[in-house]
Image (cartoon, rainbow, N blue to C red):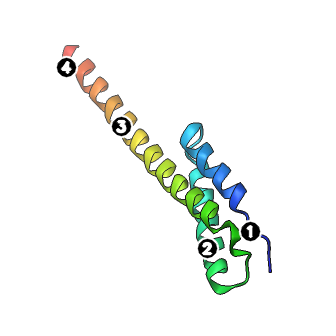
Amino acid sequence: MKPHRGTLILVLGILSLVCCGLLGIAAWLMGNTDLKEMAAGTMDPTGQGMTNAGKICGIIGTVLTILGAIFCIMYFFVVVLMASALA
């Protein structure tokens, strides 16, 4: 059996929430892969809880990053429209 990467996935998921949302994609993808391997019996299932928690944190971090980017783009367009209306 392969050893689990639950700790790494959890760390990536937490970092995606704290500082860099792009790490959430890695946590999300690695979590999916590892959970499938655990279900198939080819990976040590003792890290399933950490892997699942890291995957969830990665999903949340990714969604928050996307929402933040959308907000920044909308804010930019509002500022440009207001500046052009005042000119």
3D distance between C-alphas at marks 2 and 3? 33 Å
Looking at the rendered structure, the secondary structure element under dot 1 is: loop
Relative to 20, residue 77 above or below? above
Could you tell which of marks 3 and 4 lies nearer the N-terminus?
3
**Amino acid under label 2?**
Leu
3D distance between C-alphas at marks 4 and 1? 57 Å
**Amino acid under label 1?**
His
3D distance between C-alphas at marks 2 and 4? 53 Å
**Amino acid under label 3?**
Phe
Q: Residues within 10 Å of mark 3 (few under 14, many from 20)?
A: few
Closest to the observer: 72 or 10?
Answer: 10
3D distance between C-alphas at marks 2 and 1? 9 Å
Circles 3, 4 touching at the beta carbon (< 8 Å): no
Label disc, if present, on residue 4 of the rendered structure: 1
3D distance between C-alphas at marks 1 and 3? 37 Å
**Residue 37 x %, y %:** 66, 79
**Residue 87 x %, y %:** 23, 13
**Residue 55 x %, y %:** 56, 60
Label disc, if present, on residue 71 of the rendered structure: 3
